Image: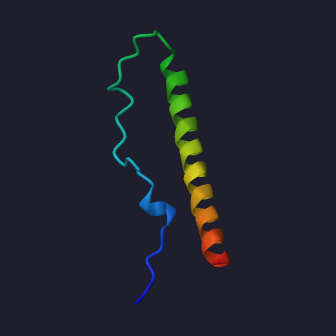
Amino acid sequence: MARQRDTIAGKLRLVLDAPDANVTALRSGADPRLVSLVRLLARQAARDFVNAEVEAARRRDLQE
């Protein structure tokens, strides 16, 4: 019987349907270009984090 792996993918929650940038009201008066840049950087940071976690899990699996 195969051993069930406890991988990071089982613990990770991804939200695939992001809200549209035009839906959120900018009550603070912030520049919409700045808000878009921050969202872009946040998405890239999230991608980098997930990729690093997947790679770390892959390395842990190879060591076992």
Q: Residue at x 48, y 20 (%)?
A: 32
Residue nearest the observer in this picture, 61 or 43: 61
Q: Residue at x 42, y 62 (%)?
A: 10
Quarter holding residue 25: top left
Residue nearest the observer in this picture, 24 or 33: 24
Relative to 28, say whether 3 is above or below.
below
Quarter holding residue 24: top left
**60 on left or right of 25:** right
Quarter holding residue 2: bottom left
Residue nearest the observer in this picture, 56 or 30: 56
Look at the image and tell me in which quarter the N terminus lies. Answer: bottom left
In the displayed orientation, state which residue is furthest to the bottom: 1
Q: Residue at x 59, y 57 (%)?
A: 53
Residue nearest the observer in this picture, 63 or 18: 63
Look at the image and tell me in which quarter the C terminus lies. Answer: bottom right
Q: Residue at x 55, y 54 (%)?
A: 50
